[in-house]
Image: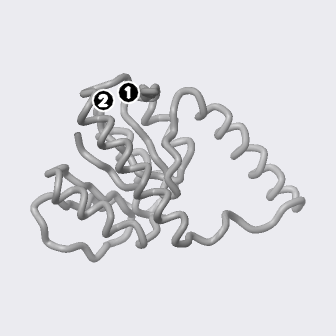
């Protein structure tokens, strides 16, 4: 497994969590961005720099992701593409996207986009805070424990044990 990070709009507050997990479990961590990032020089960390432009980082991630990989992204269309490739997607606030919830998320995203375009709604998501950081850490831990104990389950349909 590799973990790809859609780093163009990535909250730095969870970077340390991912780096610690990467080092502890020896999982490659790949940041994909359209601008240079300052990253520690560690064997498990890499940066793929793409040209500036809409969705170029997303396209590169979708091109490189393999079944069983994990992608950290707030971009719902990218999450949908990742799931279609039998990989996993999680947002920085700890939501694990699945085949069961991705279509609803896409529909809600499109509705909110339309409301903003028509001036009926302004603003974006709430500011990223400590509760979001903790929710992400908890979900990542549950995901990785499940992956290690169950092996390779079917992406997009996590197994839930009673």
Indicate the position of residue 10 as horizontal and vertical percent values: 45, 64
Q: Is residue 1 left or right of residue 50?
A: left
Residue lying farthest bottom? 38
Q: Which mark is residue 86?
A: 1
Q: Is residue 63 left or right of residue 58?
A: left
Could you classify mark 1 by the number of other residues whose Cα lies within 10 Å: few (under 14), some (14-19), or many (20 or more)? some
Indicate the position of residue 113 as horizontal and vertical percent values: 74, 52
Indicate the position of residue 62 as horizontal and vertical percent values: 38, 40
Q: Residue at x 19, y 61 (%)?
A: 45
Would residue 31 be seen by someone viewing this image from the given angle?
Answer: yes
Q: Residue at x 49, y 57 (%)?
A: 135
Residue 66 in the image: above or below residue 8: above
Q: Which quadrant is the N terminus positioned in?
A: top left
Residue 8 in the image: above or below residue 57: below
Could you classify mark 2 by the number of other residues whose Cα lies within 10 Å: few (under 14), some (14-19), or many (20 or more)? some
Query: Image quarter for residue 85?
Result: top left
Residue lying farthest left? 43
Q: What SS does tag 2 mark?
A: loop
Residue lying farthest front? 162
Q: Disc count in the image?
A: 2
Nearest the viewer among 75 and 126 is 126
Do tag 1 and tag 2 residues touch (Cβ < 8 Å)?
yes
Q: Which mark is residue 67?
A: 2
Q: Residue at x 30, y 43 (%)?
A: 144
Q: What SS does tag 1 mark?
A: loop
Type of colouring: one colour
Q: Is residue 66 left or right of residue 108?
A: left
Instruction: Measure the alpha-carbon separation of dots 1 and 2.
Output: 5 Å
């Amino acid at each position: 497994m590799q973990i790809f990070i859609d780093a163009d709009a990535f909250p730095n507050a969870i970077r340390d969590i991912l780096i610690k997990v990467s080092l502890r479990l020896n999982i490659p961590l790949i940041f994909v961005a359209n601008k240079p990032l300052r990253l520690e020089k560690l064997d498990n960390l890499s940066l793929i720099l793409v040209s500036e432009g809409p969705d170029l980082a997303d396209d590169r991630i979708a091109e490189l992701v393999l079944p069983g990989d994990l992608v950290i992204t707030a971009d719902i269309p990218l999450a949908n593409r990742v799931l279609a490739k039998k990989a996993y997607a999680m947002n920085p606030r700890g939501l694990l996207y699945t085949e069961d919830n991705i279509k609803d998320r896409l529909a809600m995203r499109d509705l909110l986009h339309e409301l903003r375009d028509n001036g009926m709604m302004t603003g974006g998501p709430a500011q990223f805070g400590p509760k979001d950081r903790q929710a992400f850490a908890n979900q990542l831990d549950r995901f990785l424990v499940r992956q290690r104990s169950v092996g390779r389950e079917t992406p997009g349909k996590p197994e839930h044990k009673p």
